[in-house]
Image (cartoon, rainbow, N blue to C red):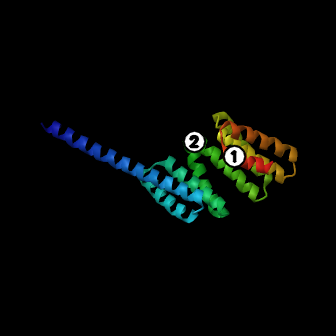
Amino acid sequence: MFSRRLLKIFCLLLFIVQNSYAQNTSTFDNLLTSANNNINSGSYNQATLQLKDALKQSEIAKNRKNEAHVYDLLAEISIKKREFKEFKTYDAFATQIATQLKDTALLISLNNRKGIYYMEEGQNELAAQQYNTALNLSIAKKETKKIAEIYSNLGSLFLAMGDKDKAINNFFNALKLHELNDNKRGVGETYSNI
């Protein structure tokens, strides 16, 4: 009789924990969705507030993957706002966690964004290294959308460096992949670069 009662209590506790986890996951996902919408519309301050709430939830839940994802989005906002000191901080946190978790998709995004940062800083060799690291990881994972984005970034880098032939080659590689993925925005942006 005692063990039956203990079993019922255990099941009830398990149900409560699972329900709490589901609510936290749903809240986190809602914050990320809303933050992404705000990033896409240029409402960076609102997105930052939402992401900081999501970060608190991730830390409480000890969900390192979610933490890394939030830091990645905070780094994205920082680079768009040209707040390079903040970018480096968020990027370092995201990179550390992504490396520990061996999260290749996140590492691709982080290396690509570091390439953008170094290009903005005029450090073209470092930008090329980051883009090539991201490109190699993307090719290994067969992430064609990311490969196209990286080729486009490489095209911009080579154009800035005055190597028009390499720039055109990378833009055409990007264009082929954007067309393959039916990415009309990517196709349009790439044509404007060519």
The image shows residue 88, relative to residue 23, as above or below, that is below
SS class, disc 1: helix
In screen coordinates, is 179 left or right of 167? left
Q: Amino acid at mark 2?
A: Asp
> Which residue in the rendered view is the most extreme toward the left?
1
In screen coordinates, is 133 left or right of 161? left
Q: Are marks 2 and 1 in contact (CB under 8 Å)?
A: no
**Residue labelled with disc 1:** 186
**Does any portion of residue 81 appear in the rendered image?**
yes
Q: Amino acid at mark 1?
A: Gly
At a point 77% along the width and 51% down the height, the residue shown is 192
| Location of residue 88 (image quadrant) | bottom right
| Location of residue 84 (image quadrant) | bottom right
Other-residue count near label 2 (Cα within 10 Å), few / some / many at <14 / 14–19 / ≥20 = some
SS class, disc 2: loop
At a point 67% along the width and 51% down the height, the residue shown is 113
**Residue 75 at x, y percent in the picture:** 61, 57
**Residue 76 at x, y percent in the picture:** 62, 56
**Residue 191 at x, y percent in the picture:** 77, 47
In screen coordinates, is 78 left or right of 5? right
The image shows residue 176, relative to residue 36, as above or below, that is above
**Residue 60 at x, y percent in the picture:** 42, 54
Which image quadrant: the N terminus?
Answer: top left
**Does any portion of residue 130 appear in the rendered image?**
no
Other-residue count near label 1 (Cα within 10 Å), few / some / many at <14 / 14–19 / ≥20 = many
Pick the front one: 101 or 78:
78
Pick the front one: 185 or 70:
185
Task: Point out which mark residue 103 bears.
Answer: 2
First in residue order: circle 2 vs circle 1: 2
At a point 78% along the width and 55% down the height, the residue shown is 123
At a point 53% along the width and 54% down the height, the residue shown is 70
